[in-house]
Image (spheres, coloured by chain):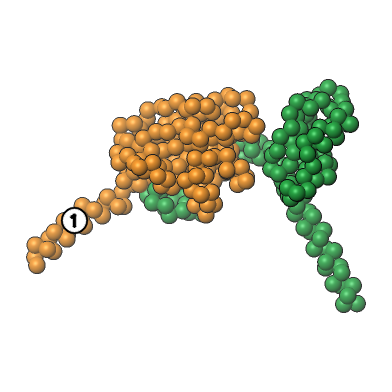
Amino acid sequence: MKSLLLALVISTALTAPELAAARSVTLTTTLNNYGGDGAYLALYVTDAAGAYKGTLWVAGGKSKYYSHLSGWERGSGGNLAQISGITGASVGAGRTLKVTLDLADALFDAGYKLHIDAAVEDMRDSPSDVVVPLTSAGAGQPVKGRNYIRSFTYGM
Amino acid sequence: MRRAALIAVAVLGVLASGVAMADDDDCTVPMAQWQPREAVAEMAKARGWTVSRIRVDDGCYQIRGQDENGRAFKAKIDPGSLAVIGLKRKGEDHDRSGRRHRDGASRPAPASPTGAPPANGLFGDGAAPKVEIQ
């Protein structure tokens, strides 16, 4: 009985911080001077199997254009309830979006990937403009985007 | 008297819905009532426009080309009545559709959004993200 209690105490001590632990992360996205309107961006996370896990931020004020963020739309089903409180203005060409949030520790070094979909009015949609694995070692390393994103960095 | 009041309410309701619809730049014409692209091209030609492209956007026809004065423009056309419901010429400010909001430069970014983020397991402390656009 005593050993069971001890095991319980130890396992609780080991798992509780794991569940609760989080770290402050700044996601910095700088856009190219692509010469168009402000870009709509969706920052979301997929798990090791590539399945959509959740959204971190959506830049862009009109929800009717969110379907152009096609990777995000496919994963989230376009469910606006999932992004309540985590949306803001679109990001102009050449400008930098900085999102600082408390990200769960469990997302790092566990196969999770951060995706950024981008869309600009009258220009080509760019799903997964950036895809970057969330690892402790990758923090602070700039990653180049495919179309509209010049660089993306997550810093801890 | 009662009837007059009812009519007044009905009229006000219609007016109010008109105002609400005018705020949106989508067209809601059923497909069965759409006029063909050729009709759009004809209408543009009659106005003296040179069309470079006709496409469908937000349920409306959208024409790109040059107007009668040779200026590049983009027009939004009701697919049923072929009425011009939005026109933007090159060098002018955006049309009435309010698309200026897509440009982060013309709308200040929210320094800190209100409300907590969704409980999707990603946010460690449940606090709203801090956001800035530089």
Tell me the colour chain A is drawn in.
orange
Q: Residue at x 41, y 38 (%)?
A: A114
Q: Position of residue A41 (x, y in %)?
A: 53, 38
**Residue A125, horizontal then vertical, whole percent:** 57, 33
* Rendered residue at 63%/28% (across/down): A36
Image position, residue A126 (x, y; %): 53, 32
Q: Colour of chain B?
A: green
Left or right of A97 on screen, residue A38: right
Identify which residue, A128 or B91, lies in the foreground: A128
A152, above or below A73, in the image? above
Q: Chain of mark 1?
A: A
Amino acid type for the residue under numbered disc 1: Ser
Q: Where does the C terminus of chain B fall, quadrant-wise?
A: top right
Asked if residue B125 lies left or right of residue B104, the reply is left
Of B98 and B30, which appears nearest the observer? B30
Label 1's element? helix
> Residue reaching furthest bottom?
B2
Q: Residue at x 49, y 40 (%)?
A: A71
Using the image, determine if residue B80 lies above or below residue A143: below
In the picture as drawn, the residue positioned furthest to the top comes out as B70
Foreground residue among B77 and A35: B77
- Locate residue A107: give its quadrant: top left
**Which residue: 50% across, 44% down?**
A74
Q: Quadrant of residue A4?
A: bottom left
Towards the viewer: A109 or A97: A109
Residue beneath disc 1: A11
Is residue A13 placed above or below B74 in the rendered structure? below
Q: Could you classify mark 1 by the number of other residues whose Cα lies within 10 Å: few (under 14), some (14-19), or many (20 or more)?
A: few
